[in-house]
Image: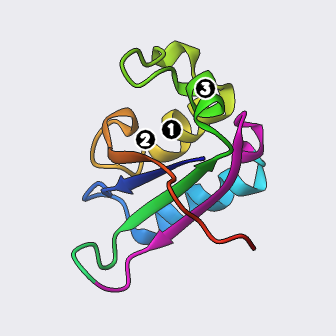
Amino acid sequence: MIVSIHQYELADSASSADFCDAVTEAVDENLFDDIPGLVDYRIGRGIKGSRTDQFAAVWVYESKASWEAVWGPVDEPVPKSAYPDAWLRWEDELLDPVLADDPDTIEYTSYEVLAQNHD
């Protein structure tokens, strides 16, 4: 399993409501259901710590192989032109207007899961 944590920095011209509207639109359009291998996601706002009132997403992929099928191996990522159409809509049309920088350059870390609960 792979878990990617994406941190979003809003543009000065964007409000929290603008970000929430972008998320709502993506969910309403089922954009995240169209990402191969993505089995779960959470998008939230920080309530404590260094990112209070800032946004982040947790993307969960069923396996490293499924993650690599979408994004490429760690040392050879796919070009943006090969991203799934749903992800391009999310980044280019919904996120881009509200983020401080290009959505493809956000701070993120992808983790290979070593342990998890068995719910």
Q: Are marks 3 and 2 in contact (CB under 8 Å)?
A: no
- Residue drawn at point x = 67 percent, y = 51 percent: 26
Residue 94 vs residue 51, the one in the foreground: 51
Label placed on residue 101: none
**Could you tell me how far apart the alpha carbons at marks 3 and 2 are, in whole angstroms?**
21 Å
Give the residue at mark 2.
96
Q: Amino acid at mark 3?
A: Val
Give the residue at mark 3.
70
**Could you tell me how far apart the alpha carbons at marks 1 and 3 are, in whole angstroms?**
15 Å
Number of other residues with Cα within 10 Å of mark 1, as a class: few under 14, some 14 to 19, many 20 or more: some
Mark 1: secondary structure: helix
Whichever of labels 3 and 2 marks the residue nearer the N terminus, that label is 3
- Residue drawn at point x = 77 percent, y = 45 percent: 33
Number of other residues with Cα within 10 Å of mark 3, as a class: few under 14, some 14 to 19, many 20 or more: some
Q: Are marks 1 and 2 in contact (CB under 8 Å)?
A: yes
Whichever of labels 1 and 2 marks the residue nearer the N terminus, that label is 1
Q: Position of residue 74 (x, y in %)?
A: 40, 25
Mark 3, mark 2: which one is toward the viewer?
Answer: 3
Give the residue at mark 1.
91
Q: Amino acid at mark 1?
A: Glu
Residue 77 left/right relative to 52: right
Residue 106 vs residue 108, the one in the foreground: 108
Residue 11 left/right relative to 66: left
- Which stretch appears magenta? 31-48
Query: Magenta stretch containing residue 39, yes or no?
Result: yes
Q: Position of residue 61 (x, y in %)?
A: 63, 45
Query: Magenta stretch containing residue 103, yes or no?
Result: no
Q: Amino acid at mark 2?
A: Asp
- Residue drawn at point x = 30 percent, y = 79 percent: 52
